[in-house]
Amino acid sequence: MKPVLLITGGSLGIGAACARIAATQGYDIALNYRSSATEAEAIAADCRAAGSKVVLCQGDVSDPAAIADIYAKIDAEFGRLNAVINNAGVVDQTARLTDIDHARLRRMFDINVIGAMLVAKEAVIRMQAQGTGGVIVNMSSAAARLGSGNQYLDYAASKAAIDCFTKGLSDEVAAQNIRVMAVRPGLIETEIHAKGGEPGRADRLAHMVPMKRKGTAEEVARATVWLLSDDASYVTGSTLDVTGGR
Protein backbone atom coordinates (compact mmCIF):
# COMPACT_ATOMS: atom_id res chain seq x y z
CA MET A 1 0.00 0.00 0.00
CA LYS A 2 1.50 3.30 -1.07
CA PRO A 3 2.01 6.11 1.44
CA VAL A 4 -0.41 9.01 1.05
CA LEU A 5 0.95 12.54 0.78
CA LEU A 6 -1.05 15.76 1.07
CA ILE A 7 0.46 18.75 -0.72
CA THR A 8 -1.20 22.11 -0.12
CA GLY A 9 -0.79 24.75 -2.79
CA GLY A 10 0.15 21.98 -5.18
CA SER A 11 -0.86 23.38 -8.55
CA LEU A 12 2.08 25.71 -9.21
CA GLY A 13 5.73 26.30 -8.42
CA ILE A 14 7.38 24.36 -5.63
CA GLY A 15 4.18 22.49 -4.71
CA ALA A 16 3.75 21.23 -8.27
CA ALA A 17 7.41 20.18 -8.45
CA CYS A 18 7.01 18.30 -5.15
CA ALA A 19 4.00 16.46 -6.55
CA ARG A 20 5.80 15.35 -9.70
CA ILE A 21 8.86 14.12 -7.78
CA ALA A 22 6.82 12.43 -5.04
CA ALA A 23 4.86 10.54 -7.70
CA THR A 24 8.10 9.03 -9.00
CA GLN A 25 9.02 8.06 -5.42
CA GLY A 26 5.92 5.92 -4.90
CA TYR A 27 3.45 8.24 -3.16
CA ASP A 28 -0.26 8.52 -3.75
CA ILE A 29 -1.16 12.18 -3.60
CA ALA A 30 -3.91 14.43 -2.29
CA LEU A 31 -3.28 17.59 -4.30
CA ASN A 32 -4.75 20.75 -2.83
CA TYR A 33 -5.22 23.96 -4.79
CA ARG A 34 -7.28 27.10 -4.27
CA SER A 35 -8.20 28.42 -7.72
CA SER A 36 -5.78 27.09 -10.36
CA ALA A 37 -7.95 24.16 -11.45
CA THR A 38 -6.48 23.81 -14.95
CA GLU A 39 -2.94 23.73 -13.61
CA ALA A 40 -3.90 21.29 -10.85
CA GLU A 41 -5.45 18.93 -13.40
CA ALA A 42 -2.25 19.04 -15.46
CA ILE A 43 -0.09 18.19 -12.43
CA ALA A 44 -2.47 15.40 -11.48
CA ALA A 45 -2.20 13.95 -14.99
CA ASP A 46 1.60 13.95 -14.76
CA CYS A 47 1.49 12.20 -11.38
CA ARG A 48 -0.98 9.59 -12.59
CA ALA A 49 1.26 8.89 -15.56
CA ALA A 50 4.02 8.13 -13.03
CA GLY A 51 1.76 5.59 -11.31
CA SER A 52 0.20 7.59 -8.50
CA LYS A 53 -3.40 7.75 -7.45
CA VAL A 54 -4.20 11.47 -7.24
CA VAL A 55 -7.20 13.07 -5.58
CA LEU A 56 -7.72 16.77 -6.22
CA CYS A 57 -8.78 18.69 -3.10
CA GLN A 58 -9.89 22.22 -3.88
CA GLY A 59 -9.93 24.57 -0.92
CA ASP A 60 -8.55 27.77 0.59
CA VAL A 61 -6.44 26.92 3.65
CA SER A 62 -7.32 30.26 5.24
CA ASP A 63 -10.84 28.84 5.72
CA PRO A 64 -11.17 26.21 8.49
CA ALA A 65 -14.25 24.77 6.81
CA ALA A 66 -12.27 24.24 3.61
CA ILE A 67 -9.52 22.44 5.56
CA ALA A 68 -12.18 20.18 7.05
CA ASP A 69 -13.46 19.42 3.55
CA ILE A 70 -9.94 18.62 2.29
CA TYR A 71 -9.41 16.12 5.07
CA ALA A 72 -12.88 14.63 4.66
CA LYS A 73 -11.98 13.88 1.05
CA ILE A 74 -8.65 12.32 2.07
CA ASP A 75 -10.42 10.18 4.67
CA ALA A 76 -13.00 9.01 2.12
CA GLU A 77 -10.62 8.40 -0.79
CA PHE A 78 -7.58 6.99 1.02
CA GLY A 79 -8.50 6.25 4.63
CA ARG A 80 -4.98 7.14 5.76
CA LEU A 81 -2.39 9.90 5.71
CA ASN A 82 1.35 9.45 5.95
CA ALA A 83 2.92 12.77 4.98
CA VAL A 84 2.16 16.45 4.42
CA ILE A 85 3.99 19.15 2.50
CA ASN A 86 2.52 22.31 3.99
CA ASN A 87 3.26 24.50 0.99
CA ALA A 88 0.29 26.83 0.43
CA GLY A 89 1.28 30.45 0.88
CA VAL A 90 0.96 33.97 -0.46
CA VAL A 91 3.09 37.04 -0.95
CA ASP A 92 1.91 40.57 -1.75
CA GLN A 93 3.20 43.64 -3.54
CA THR A 94 6.52 44.99 -2.32
CA ALA A 95 5.91 47.57 0.41
CA ARG A 96 7.30 49.14 3.56
CA LEU A 97 5.55 48.59 6.87
CA THR A 98 4.08 52.10 6.76
CA ASP A 99 2.20 51.11 3.60
CA ILE A 100 0.85 47.78 4.91
CA ASP A 101 -2.68 47.70 6.29
CA HIS A 102 -4.52 45.34 8.61
CA ALA A 103 -6.35 43.54 5.80
CA ARG A 104 -3.06 42.61 4.13
CA LEU A 105 -1.59 41.36 7.42
CA ARG A 106 -4.73 39.38 8.18
CA ARG A 107 -4.64 37.66 4.78
CA MET A 108 -0.91 36.94 5.03
CA PHE A 109 -1.09 35.33 8.45
CA ASP A 110 -4.42 33.57 7.87
CA ILE A 111 -2.91 31.66 4.94
CA ASN A 112 0.79 31.41 5.70
CA VAL A 113 0.60 30.75 9.44
CA ILE A 114 -2.85 29.91 10.77
CA GLY A 115 -3.77 27.84 7.73
CA ALA A 116 -0.50 25.91 7.92
CA MET A 117 -1.00 25.25 11.63
CA LEU A 118 -4.53 23.98 11.14
CA VAL A 119 -3.46 21.74 8.24
CA ALA A 120 -0.73 20.30 10.47
CA LYS A 121 -3.17 19.86 13.35
CA GLU A 122 -5.50 17.67 11.30
CA ALA A 123 -2.54 15.68 10.01
CA VAL A 124 -1.24 15.03 13.52
CA ILE A 125 -4.68 13.88 14.70
CA ARG A 126 -4.75 11.26 11.95
CA MET A 127 -1.13 10.20 12.29
CA GLN A 128 -1.51 9.70 16.03
CA ALA A 129 -4.72 7.71 15.55
CA GLN A 130 -3.03 5.48 12.96
CA GLY A 131 -0.16 4.84 15.34
CA THR A 132 2.37 4.50 12.54
CA GLY A 133 3.98 7.93 12.66
CA GLY A 134 4.26 10.35 9.77
CA VAL A 135 6.07 13.34 8.37
CA ILE A 136 5.18 17.01 8.01
CA VAL A 137 7.36 19.43 6.04
CA ASN A 138 6.44 23.09 6.36
CA MET A 139 7.50 25.48 3.60
CA SER A 140 9.33 28.42 5.13
CA SER A 141 11.61 30.90 3.35
CA ALA A 142 15.07 32.40 3.65
CA ALA A 143 13.10 35.62 4.21
CA ALA A 144 12.56 34.36 7.77
CA ARG A 145 16.28 34.98 8.36
CA LEU A 146 16.76 37.96 6.09
CA GLY A 147 13.76 40.03 7.20
CA SER A 148 12.98 41.33 3.69
CA GLY A 149 12.90 44.96 4.74
CA ASN A 150 11.57 47.32 2.06
CA GLN A 151 10.15 44.30 0.23
CA TYR A 152 8.00 41.72 2.01
CA LEU A 153 8.37 42.40 5.73
CA ASP A 154 5.03 40.79 6.52
CA TYR A 155 5.79 37.70 4.44
CA ALA A 156 9.15 37.30 6.18
CA ALA A 157 7.49 37.57 9.59
CA SER A 158 4.94 34.93 8.65
CA LYS A 159 7.72 32.54 7.62
CA ALA A 160 9.65 33.20 10.84
CA ALA A 161 6.48 32.10 12.64
CA ILE A 162 6.55 28.88 10.59
CA ASP A 163 10.13 28.21 11.71
CA CYS A 164 9.12 28.56 15.36
CA PHE A 165 6.01 26.45 14.86
CA THR A 166 8.05 23.73 13.19
CA LYS A 167 10.38 23.37 16.16
CA GLY A 168 7.59 23.46 18.73
CA LEU A 169 5.40 20.92 16.95
CA SER A 170 8.34 18.61 16.32
CA ASP A 171 8.97 18.46 20.09
CA GLU A 172 5.31 17.73 20.79
CA VAL A 173 5.00 14.77 18.45
CA ALA A 174 8.48 13.22 18.21
CA ALA A 175 7.62 10.46 20.68
CA GLN A 176 4.83 9.32 18.34
CA ASN A 177 7.34 8.95 15.48
CA ILE A 178 5.94 12.01 13.72
CA ARG A 179 8.74 14.06 12.22
CA VAL A 180 8.31 17.78 11.52
CA MET A 181 10.76 19.88 9.50
CA ALA A 182 10.81 23.07 7.49
CA VAL A 183 12.47 23.96 4.20
CA ARG A 184 13.67 27.50 3.54
CA PRO A 185 13.87 28.20 -0.20
CA GLY A 186 16.00 31.12 -1.26
CA LEU A 187 15.80 32.98 -4.55
CA ILE A 188 13.80 30.48 -6.61
CA GLU A 189 12.32 31.01 -10.06
CA THR A 190 8.58 30.56 -9.50
CA GLU A 191 5.38 32.49 -10.13
CA ILE A 192 5.56 34.08 -6.67
CA HIS A 193 7.72 36.96 -7.91
CA ALA A 194 5.17 38.01 -10.51
CA LYS A 195 2.45 37.83 -7.87
CA GLY A 196 4.53 40.26 -5.82
CA GLY A 197 4.70 42.64 -8.76
CA GLU A 198 8.31 41.81 -9.71
CA PRO A 199 8.37 39.09 -12.38
CA GLY A 200 12.08 39.66 -13.03
CA ARG A 201 13.11 39.68 -9.36
CA ALA A 202 14.95 36.34 -9.37
CA ASP A 203 17.12 37.39 -12.30
CA ARG A 204 17.71 40.86 -10.87
CA LEU A 205 18.95 39.56 -7.50
CA ALA A 206 20.79 36.42 -8.62
CA HIS A 207 24.15 38.17 -8.27
CA MET A 208 23.58 38.37 -4.49
CA VAL A 209 23.55 34.57 -4.16
CA PRO A 210 26.99 33.03 -3.44
CA MET A 211 26.34 30.47 -6.19
CA LYS A 212 25.56 33.40 -8.54
CA ARG A 213 22.34 31.95 -9.84
CA LYS A 214 18.68 31.54 -8.98
CA GLY A 215 17.37 28.15 -7.92
CA THR A 216 14.61 26.03 -9.42
CA ALA A 217 11.42 24.67 -7.95
CA GLU A 218 12.73 21.18 -8.69
CA GLU A 219 15.82 21.77 -6.53
CA VAL A 220 13.64 22.72 -3.59
CA ALA A 221 11.29 19.83 -4.26
CA ARG A 222 14.06 17.24 -4.28
CA ALA A 223 15.23 18.40 -0.85
CA THR A 224 11.66 18.44 0.45
CA VAL A 225 10.79 14.95 -0.75
CA TRP A 226 14.07 13.67 0.70
CA LEU A 227 12.94 14.87 4.12
CA LEU A 228 9.79 12.76 3.73
CA SER A 229 11.84 9.64 3.08
CA ASP A 230 13.28 7.01 5.40
CA ASP A 231 16.72 8.34 4.44
CA ALA A 232 15.88 11.27 6.76
CA SER A 233 14.50 9.06 9.53
CA TYR A 234 16.53 10.72 12.32
CA VAL A 235 15.80 14.27 11.18
CA THR A 236 13.17 16.29 13.00
CA GLY A 237 12.84 19.83 14.31
CA SER A 238 15.31 21.03 11.68
CA THR A 239 15.05 23.74 9.06
CA LEU A 240 16.86 23.10 5.79
CA ASP A 241 18.07 26.04 3.72
CA VAL A 242 17.90 25.58 -0.06
CA THR A 243 19.36 28.95 -0.89
CA GLY A 244 22.54 28.62 -2.92
CA GLY A 245 24.40 29.78 0.19
CA ARG A 246 22.50 33.02 0.74
Image (cartoon, rainbow, N blue to C red):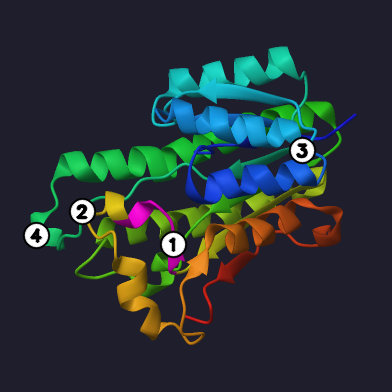
Which residue position holds label 2? 93
Which residue position holds label 3? 50
The residue segment tinted magenta is 187-193
**Left or right, 182 with reference to 78:** left
At 70% from the left edge and 12% from the top edge, which residue is drawn? Answer: 76
Q: Amino acid at mark 4?
A: Thr
Instruction: Give coordinates of residue 160: x percent, y percent.
Output: 43, 60
Instruction: Give coordinates of residue 183: x percent, y percent.
Output: 58, 60
Instruction: Give coordinates of residue 62: x percent, y percent.
Output: 39, 31
Callout 3: SS: loop
Query: Does residue 20 sit above or below 219 in this rendering?
Result: above
Between disc 2 and disc 1, the foreground one is: 1
Q: Decide if residue 237 is in sight here.
A: no
Mark 3 to mark 2: distance in Å?
A: 37 Å
Is the C-beta separation of discs 4 and 2 under 8 Å?
A: no
Between disc 3 and disc 4, the foreground one is: 3
Mark 4 Cα shell of 10 Å, populated few (<14), some (14-19), many (≥20)? few
At 82% from the left edge and 46% from the top edge, which residue is drawn? Answer: 177
Mark 2 to mark 1: distance in Å?
A: 17 Å
